Image (cartoon, grey):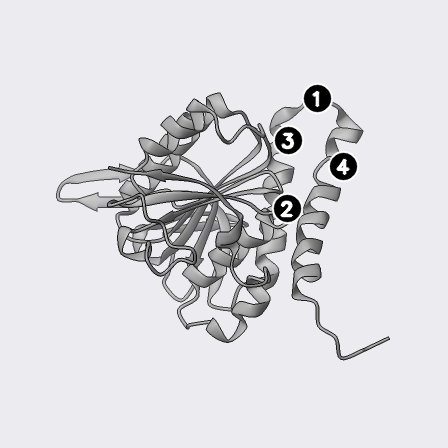
Amino acid sequence: MDRSRIDPKEFQESITKELDTIRNRVRNLIGASHWGEEGRYKEAILKNVIRRFLPNNLSIGTGFVIKKNNNETQISNQIDIIIYDNTIPVLFSEGDFVITTYKNVKGIIEVKTRIRNSELEEVIRKAEDNGRLIGKEIFNGIFSYESDENIESENVYRALKNARGYMNHISLGKDVFIRFWRKEDRNRLNPPVENCESNFYNIYKLRGLSFSYFISNLLELTCSSKIDDRWWFLYPIAGTKERYRVRTICLD
């Protein structure tokens, strides 16, 4: 055995396998009679996995974000997962529950057990509302343990077409990963996106790697320091994931 061999792809796939293995444990015990508790459990699973990789200055919780505009106070919808800079005080904290202002928010995530294509538009709208309130560039993601497989559907097209980039990362089950790109990025992708003159979403089919790519993008966007020394580890697909791009949706 070559003990010096490092296999980042196998490591990243193990994250997906771990999430996939433990996601049904509560359902196996309580059945479908307490969906709310099952949902909170699955939020906790994802939190625990993300927490392992965060630097010490970032914390993870759930709660609300408040923003004051002139004389108007705006409050977000309840956010399943908030990643925030703990060097800036929060307004309130009790266990994992926090209320804070937008300044220390680095990332937010909406967690779903399953998203059907017909529900995607409404889920995106909620994530966008929270992103608009925060009003700065953050990681704004939707994470679903399961989803419909038909990513060519009109529902998916319409949901992403109507989005405006405030929501920027989606994991639809363990295979489908969606990312928002700005139009200036289209020529640096390999192969480039040639059919868009505007911002766009790319849909990728990443077998067994959607969950880990979602988390890797989260780490890249929330860390204050560049982590390009470990891209080979965070994004282990040989060459580029663009080879697995199956659909581009332009936001013209």
Asked if residue 10 is positioned above or below residue 97 in the image, the reply reads below
- Please tell me whether mark 1 sits on a helix, a strand or a loop: loop
Q: Upstream in the sequence, badge 2 or badge 1?
A: 1
Mark 4 neighbour density, 10 Å: few (under 14) some (14–19) many (20 or more):
few
Q: Which residue is mark 4?
A: 25
Q: Residue at x 58, y 30 (%)?
A: 149
Instruction: Give the amino acid at mark 1.
Output: Ala
Whether pointer 4 and pointer 3 mark residues with C-beta atoms closer than 8 Å, the reply is no
Q: Which residue is mark 2?
A: 207
Q: Could you tell me if residue 65 is visible in this image?
A: no
What is the C-alpha distance between the residues marked 4 and 2? 23 Å
Q: Residue at x 55, y 53 (%)?
A: 213
In the drawing, does residue 179 fall left or right of residue 114?
left
Disc 4 versus disc 3: nearer the observer: 4
Disc 4 versus disc 2: nearer the observer: 2
Instruction: Give the amino acid at mark 2.
Output: Arg
Q: Nearer the viewer, residue 160 or 134?
A: 160
In the drawing, does residue 207 fall left or right of residue 80?
right
Disc 2 versus disc 3: nearer the observer: 2
- Please tell me whether mark 2 sits on a helix, a strand or a loop: loop
Residue 15 image label: none
Q: Which residue is mark 1?
A: 32
Q: Residue at x 52, y 52 (%)?
A: 243
Quarter the C terminus occupies: top left
